[in-house]
Image (cartoon, rainbow, N blue to C red):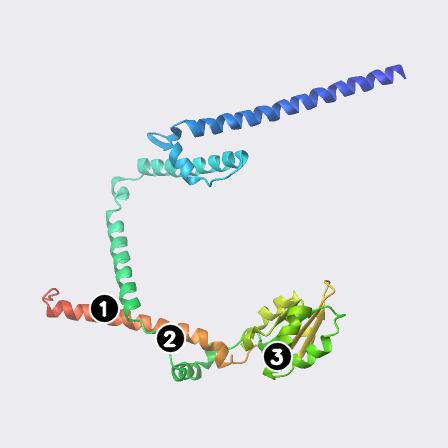
Amino acid sequence: MIKFAGFNAILMKQKIIYKTIAAAALILSVAVSCEWVDKVITGETVASVGKVRLSRAELNKALPSGLLPEDSVRLAHQYINAWASELVFLQVAENQLSKEELDVTAELEEYRKSLLKYRYEQRYVNERLDTIFTQEQIREYYEAHQERFLLRVPVVKANFLCISPDSPYIDEFRENMAGDDAQRMQYTDSVAFASAIRYETFGGRWLNLNDLALEFGIDYSELLTYRKGNWIEYEGGTGLLHLAYLKEFEAAGKTAPLEYATPLIKDILLSIRKKELVSTLEDKLMEDARENGIFVQY
């Protein structure tokens, strides 16, 4: 027993020594980090690559404010390494490339011309672009390009309800969700505000079924398995009842309703008008240049 007690005492002493070494290592690590931070804060130069130097002011400007000391150290190291890496790469490239390869004058000039041309085109188009479309223009494009508006996912007009299954208002909600009476819908909104977790009519607009499925917390393919006629009813792991009444439904593969396709049609028509304006601009500039003697073809 005496020998065993002595052995335990030796183990305890070793544990104390190990803990002391670990604590000392931690203190030393913090001290080194703090010393490095102090140098960054007080020194004018924090890093250099050849003759190029990174100043304390530049580093401080690159780092977010309000960081903890350990985060400041980590981010400062990352920034300095990225800064040095770019410069080292650049210096090697400048030393290894030939004189002809180092000459980027032509490329810079091409980029400058392209950028100026693009900026002027943008200003010209923005000053003249008509963004208003009549319903007749939208319908005309829709009817002429039906193949562009085939649905990949079903779309619906729906009312959605999330509520406790013990609520005394469920039957009333069911009746009102399936109706079109404006007063009843307004009343349902007011009741839902106090008794439902969530009630949504989506403004009566067409809705991608993926978006409706998000309300249920499942994907749209699974959602359809719970469909019975115009109703979808689902109780997930939350213990809440999710209900949707599908007022209208268009299946995948069919042509999207005009109302649903309208935003896309407007984008397409807008793009066509922009291209026409740019094309008109090029023709107009060439015509003016010829008339004014700026452009002469021999």
Q: Which residue is mark 3?
A: 185
Q: Viewer-nearest of labels 2 and 3?
A: 3
Q: Nearer the viewer, residue 54 or 293?
A: 54
Is residue 85 something that shows in the picture?
no
Tell me the CA gap for discs 1 and 2: 20 Å
Q: Measuring from the top left, give residue 161's x and y in whole percent.
A: 66, 72
Q: Amino acid at mark 1?
A: Glu
Q: Viewer-nearest of labels 1 and 3?
A: 3
Label 1: few (<14), some (14–19) or many (≥20) C-alpha neighbours in 10 Å:
few
Q: Which residue is mark 2?
A: 269
Where 95 falls versus 239 (above or below)?
A: above
Tell me the CA gap for discs 1 and 3: 55 Å
Determine the residue positioned at 48% across, 34% down.
Answer: 77
Label 2: few (<14), some (14–19) or many (≥20) C-alpha neighbours in 10 Å:
some
Q: Measuring from the top left, give residue 95's x and y in whole percent.
A: 31, 35
Determine the residue positioned at 64% across, 69% down.
Answer: 193
At numbered mark 2, what does the secondary structure look like: helix, strand or loop?
helix
Q: Amino acid at mark 3?
A: Met
Q: Quadrant of the N terminus?
A: top right
In screen coordinates, is 88 left or right of 241? left
Q: Amino acid at mark 2?
A: Leu
- The reply to whether the C-beta atoms of the residues labelled 1 and 3 are less than 8 Å apart is no
Q: Nearer the viewer, residue 233 or 186?
A: 186
Where 62 falls versus 224 (above or below)?
A: above
Q: Which residue is mark 1?
A: 282
